[in-house]
Image (spheres, coloured by chain):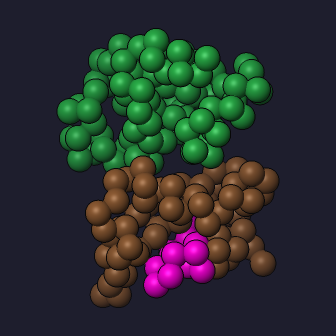
Chain colours: A brown, B green
Amino acid sequence: MSNADLVKMKVEAGLAGSHVIMHDPRKDDIHLKAEVWWEGFKGMSLIQQHRAVYDTLKEELKETLHALGIETHDRRYDQE
Amino acid sequence: MIEDMIKSKRVFLFMKGTPEEPQCGFSYHVVQILRNLNVDYGYFDVLTDDEIRQKVKEYANWPTYPQLWVNGELVGGCDIVMQLFEQGKLEEIL
């Protein structure tokens, strides 16, 4: 499983009902960006939102990932 | 000791490298924003001390660098700082 798939799986499992879109701009699977859509972010500060994401990825952040950008949205993902 | 560092300046940045020579793209971006806003800040290069590098992560409950602190409180890492900057909210905080 790629790191991108692993991150998506972990975050979506940890934040029930969230939708995660992974970006891998360098195509190296270690400098990743996670776009996280989750209604549960409502009312949280940005710090709290990012912590909630980090909390689902404790081990991965320690070892595998070199860089993980995070972009949070406090609503459901809208497919246009 | 970490607390002393954070409170030594109103605005304090833990980063990789120095403002003159950042060693990581994320630290570079935050330095550029602080420069752009003409902010006076203190900094510590976490690459120079592995013990402090680990301890600040625990103290902050935040797993990555850079970390921007204002008035003894963590504002965020690169993503949050850039987002606040783009929304024009960073100036209010600093």
Q: Where is residue A53 in the image (x, y as percent from the top left)?
A: 53, 63
**Closer to the camera, B79 or B5?**
B5
Can see residue A68? yes
Is residue B1 placed above or below B32 in the rendered structure?
above
In the picture, the quarter occupied by the C terminus of chain B is top left
Q: Where is residue A14 in the image (x, y as percent from the top left)?
A: 58, 75
Q: Is B16 part of what is drawn in magenta? A: no
Question: Is the N terminus of chain B in the top left, top right, bottom left or bottom right quadrant?
Answer: top right
Do we see residue B23 in this rendering?
A: no
Q: In which quarter of the image is residue B72?
A: top left
Labels in figure, total: 0
Instruction: Please tell me which residue is depicted at 44% across the width and 36% down the height of the picture.
Output: B74
Could you tell me which residue is drawn at 46 percent across and 79 percent down?
A18
Q: In the depicted view, which residue is nearer to us: A72 or A44?
A: A44
Q: Which picture quadrant has residue A30?
A: bottom right
- Residue at (40% x, 63% y) in the render: A72
For this view, does A76 lie left or right of residue B27? left
Magenta span covers which residues? A11-24
- On the picture, is B18 further left or further right than A38? right
The correct choice, above or below, for B45 with respect to A23 in the image is above
Q: Give percent across and percent down for residue B84.
A: 30, 44
Lateral position of residue B65 relative to residue A50, left or right: right
